Image (spheres, rainbow, N blue to C red):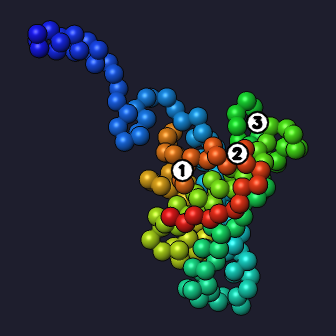
Amino acid sequence: MKHIWVLVLIPLCVGVKEDVDGVDDDDAPDSEAQLKCDACQVVAYKFGEAFVELKNEMKDGETPPDEDIVSVAESVCDDMWTGYGVTMVEGEERLSGPGTDYKMPAKGDDGDDGNLWSHRLQDMCDEFLGEVTDEKILYHTWASGNSLEEFLCRGEGTFAACVVDDWGPWPGGDYDDYEDVADFDYVHDEF
């Protein structure tokens, strides 16, 4: 009898892809790939803004102390990240707000209230700071005239949101519970 069951079960298993460790095994492109790239560009923009402010506090030719660079880089991720949402551009969802090419739609249009995006952007920022070996690398990349967007978004691994079709899940987890809660208390969970 055992042999019959084996023969019956084999056809049931043929062609079934397994979802191992939560990794999506289908070949479908990530529907949020462009949004992840947009988000990465926003994070790079915010680091650049913070470094401009830091540099403006220094005398000409003076380099900020290391502890100031670290403090400023970390403060970027502590920002509230307000004013971001989604807008439709040529039938595609795009992130809108400061540091993007798109303005937030009028309230009641297709934009997000920003709560979801505030958390996603902040968590992406924290993810980058957790992966970069030293915060000063970000400052020195910016100060040397190299592109923070190129460094953070067009590299490899965590720093490849704009060059791969499936960068991975949003850092920080599932945000479905944030979308419908108008009075959600702001909590910053660092990695």
Q: Given this view, does label 3 or label 2 mark the residue nearer the observer?
A: 2
Q: Amino acid at mark 1?
A: Gly
2 or 150, nearer to the observer: 2
28 or 5, nearer to the observer: 5
Q: Which residue is mark 2?
A: 179
Residue 45 shows which numbered tag? none
Instruction: Give the residue drawn at x 44%, y 53%.
Output: 157
The crowding category of the residue bearing disc 3, from other C-alpha atoms within 10 Å (few below 14, some 14 to 19, many at least 20), is some
The crowding category of the residue bearing disc 1, from other C-alpha atoms within 10 Å (few below 14, some 14 to 19, many at least 20), is few
Q: Position of residue 44 (x, y in %)?
A: 63, 61
Dot 1: element: loop
173 or 69, nearer to the observer: 173
Q: Earlier in the sequence, mark 2 or mark 1?
A: 1
Q: Amino acid at mark 2?
A: Glu
Relative to 44, say whether 133 is above or below. below
Q: Amino acid at mark 3?
A: Met
